[in-house]
Image (cartoon, helix red, strand yellow):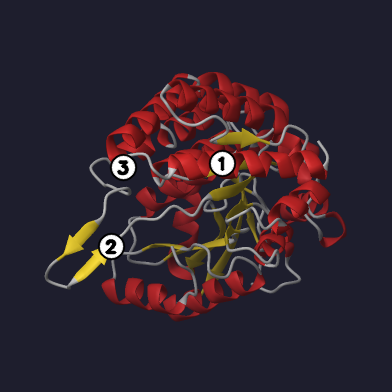
Amino acid sequence: MNTAQAGHMLERARWAAAAYAGYDTATVSTIVNAVAEAGYREAERLAADAVQETGMGVVADKVIKNRACSRGIVDHYRGQDFVSPRVDHNRKIVELPRPAGVVLALTPTTNPVATVYFKTILALMTRNAVVIAPHPRAKQCSADAARMLAAAAEAAGAPDGIIQVVDEPTIPLAEALMADERTDVIVATGGSAVVRAAYSSGNPALGVGPGNVPVLVDASADITAAARRIVDSKAFDNSVLCTNESVLIAEAGIADKLQAALTRAGAYVLDEDGARRLRAFMFPGGHLNTDVVGRDAAWIAGQAGLRVTPKTRVLVAPFGQVISEEVLAHEKLSPVLGMTTVADTARGIRAARAVVRIAGAGHSAAIHSENPEVITDFATQVPVLR
């Protein structure tokens, strides 16, 4: 596809958006429900296709995400009306829902199908047309998902062209679509370069870039429960979600107990030599080896020259200080968790702040604690939104 063809796609989307903007609540609901059910029915097939195409993640976990981002999204917003005018007599305000028009949705390689579902359904709920520009490494499963949703939408009464997809995505083509005046809003999910390009395009943009999630476990926490939850989260879909934990910060007094609990939960805690080997494989030259993204813990360990059981769910690599030169303090997008210890919770909060200064500021953080004061201080001081 060339730039001229992409322009025709946007023009077609504008006509579809203009027609769809006049649809009433009941008709929009019928279309959205039909699209969500179609996505739900194909959740398993497209999860398998995504893993096959990208080599990332776990099919069973992607099925969960695909279902959550199809029928689950509709259930979450059920009863909410994004179409009809509302009058708030107490505040003396009349609210008039107005579609943006054409939404350009940039979708990632890590969660391709679920993101196509999510962005498409939200665009339809709010009476917008959507043009999907997938990551080149996930173009086939993303395009299949988009075409399936488009067929369901049009069969339920949506205008022709309400959902479209770029079959052969390239960086220049994505940049042209982002800068085109016929694009009304960009919703970008991906790496820093993608999000920065969206924000500098000249069109309104919403971007979700990379995370680097610190998780603090203090002495008051239920250590067994914390370890189980951290391992379950880190192992889910081989940790391709940007909200998965990246750096574990443990209060020194419970660090040994926590490591033992992590081991019982299915993690493998590396020694100093193991951590050194893992660094060398995962971060050659100080940069993440993208071959590890979405791969399982046993495969990563084997590539690094480490022996673990095939059932190992997460690799835990202890390190010293949270500094930018320490590669284990950076985002990993794999079931590998950096771990450091601190003397007390005040230092733990400072370490969490340092993690997101390295990468992931404004993104996500987690804490396991039974101390309300510590939880409040953590939430107040760590500069994230989740």
Closer to us: 52 or 114? 114
Task: Kindly indicate whether the residue at mark 3 contacts the one at mark 2 (C-beta within 8 angstroms).
Answer: no
Name the quadrant containing residue 268.
top right
> Which residue lies under the disc numbered 2?
95
Left or right, residue 158 beside residue 322: left
> Which residue lies under the disc numbered 3?
76
Helix, strand, or loop for circle 3? Answer: helix
Does 316 sit above or below residue 251?
above
Q: What's the residue at 34%, 64% (across, down)?
A: 369
Q: Which amino acid does label 3 sit on?
A: His
Task: Kindly report the distance in space between the C-alpha atoms of the residues bearing marks 2 and 3.
Answer: 22 Å
- Please tell me whether mark 1 or mark 3 is closer to you in this view: 1
> Which residue lies under the disc numbered 1?
15
Task: Kindly report the distance in space between the C-alpha atoms of the residues bearing marks 2 and 1.
Answer: 25 Å
Q: Is residue 159 visible?
A: yes
User: Which quadrant: the N terminus?
Assistant: top right
Q: What's the residue at 77%, 50% (across, down)?
A: 282
Does 248 sit above or below residue 358?
above
Helix, strand, or loop for circle 2? Answer: strand
Task: Kindly report the distance in space between the C-alpha atoms of the residues bearing marks 1 and 3.
Answer: 30 Å
Using a 10 Å C-alpha cutoff, classify the residue at mark 1 as few (fewer than 14 neighbours), some (14 to 19) or many (20 or more).
Answer: some
Name the quadrant containing residue 161.
top right
Left or right, residue 318 beside residue 89: right
Q: What residue type is labelled 2?
A: Glu
- Please tell me whether mark 2 or mark 3 is closer to you in this view: 2
Q: Can residue 306 be seen in this view?
A: no
